[in-house]
Amino acid sequence: MTANGTKNGAVEIPYKIYLSENEIPAYWYNVRADMKNKPAPLLNPGTHQPMTAEELSGVFCDELVQQELNNTDPYIPIPQEIRDFYKMYRPAPLVRAYCLEEKLQTPAHIYYKFEGNNTSGSHKLNSAIAQAYYAKKQGLKGVTTETGAGQWGTALSMACSYFGLDCKVYMVKVSYEQKPFRREVMRTYGASVTPSPSETTQIGRKILAEHPGTTGSLGCAISEAVEVAVSNPGYRYVLGSVLNQVLLHQSVIGLETKTALEKYDVKPDIIIGCAGGGSNLGGLIAPFMGEKLRGEADYRIIAVEPASCPSFTRGVFAYDF
């Protein structure tokens, strides 16, 4: 993030801008409420019609379904139990990158939001604790999910442990083998971790029969996790990125960032975020994009994608089942 600010002027900006516990957002911001062109809906893979709340509730927790489909309410209250959990690692600091500015010899003032100050090591816990909370509130036994590198699985395992929920994680096989430490952190929190594709599901057995040497993919792991969720009473599937509900929960990143900058009267010109599934980028830019959509301010927003899978610039925008 680059912004106009001051180091030697009337107000010196510290290396780290901290907020107090009382400044943890009380509401998530739903950017869809301010969008004139709403996102394309989830489609039923059988009928190709927009999925209803009833259809989605067989896979996701009831309140998360409502958040998924909510295109009208700009602010959704954060339950106090979730805010209390956030206090263990939030508010996250906004850091002024003075040393980087000096190395680059740039006139730009650069800030970064640090989201690694929790056991999972990433922003994923912001949504994991919310999804676990709603599963517990619904009276479920547990949840299923997939994980690639393991950050989401780690975050969800921690959240489920906090609420006493069973957690079944299907981890992409190549990552399961390459990242034993993250795998074991999940198990330390009580989660079961299965390398995917596996022999424990119909879809896993089918994939292994067709591709016996496969090291797995996120698609395989998702398919297994969804199958287990829908075939076991008292379980639902949860996801760490992509979905509207996840971007909603991650808006705490941007809301805190905006509050921290406003403390020092700093208005960013450019906002940059890495974009894989989109939850980090979406969470960071949400309140700034809201201002942009409402015509209250203007920002240049840059999404940085991986060269190995450049889905924004070289991907196909299409439904995929």
Image (cartoon, helix red, strand yellow):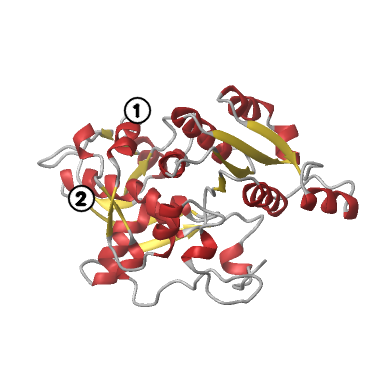
Residue 142 located left or right of residue 289: right
Q: Is residue 211 above or below residue 158?
A: below
Left of 101 or right of it: where is 222?
right
Instruction: Please give the residue where the numbered disc 1 appears in the rendered image.
Output: 88
Residue 27 badge: none
Residue type at mark 1? Met
Q: How many marks?
A: 2
Does the rendering let one see residue 140?
yes
How packed mark 2 is, by other alpha carbons closer than 10 Å (few <14, some 14-19, many 20 or more), is some
Q: Nearer the viewer, mark 2 or mark 1?
A: 1
The residue shown at (75%, 33%) is 177
Q: Residue at x 39, y 58 (%)?
A: 67
Q: Residue at x 67, y 46 (%)?
A: 228
Q: Residue 147, how many percent across, how many down?
A: 62, 43
* Residue 168 figure quarter: top right
Q: Residue furthest top?
A: 188
In which image quadrant can residue 193 be found?
top right
Label 1 SS: loop
Q: Residue at x 68, y 40 (%)?
A: 171
The earlier-in-sequence mark between 2 and 1 is: 1
Please name the residue that numbered disc 2 is placed on: 266
Quarter that holds the C terminus: bottom right
Q: Position of residue 83 (x, y in %)?
A: 30, 37
Q: Nearer the viewer, residue 33 or 118?
A: 33
Q: Is residue 139 above or below residue 179?
A: below
Q: CA distance from mark 2 to mark 1?
A: 27 Å
Q: Secondary structure at mark 2?
A: loop
Picture coordinates of residue 303, whole percent (x, y): 47, 59
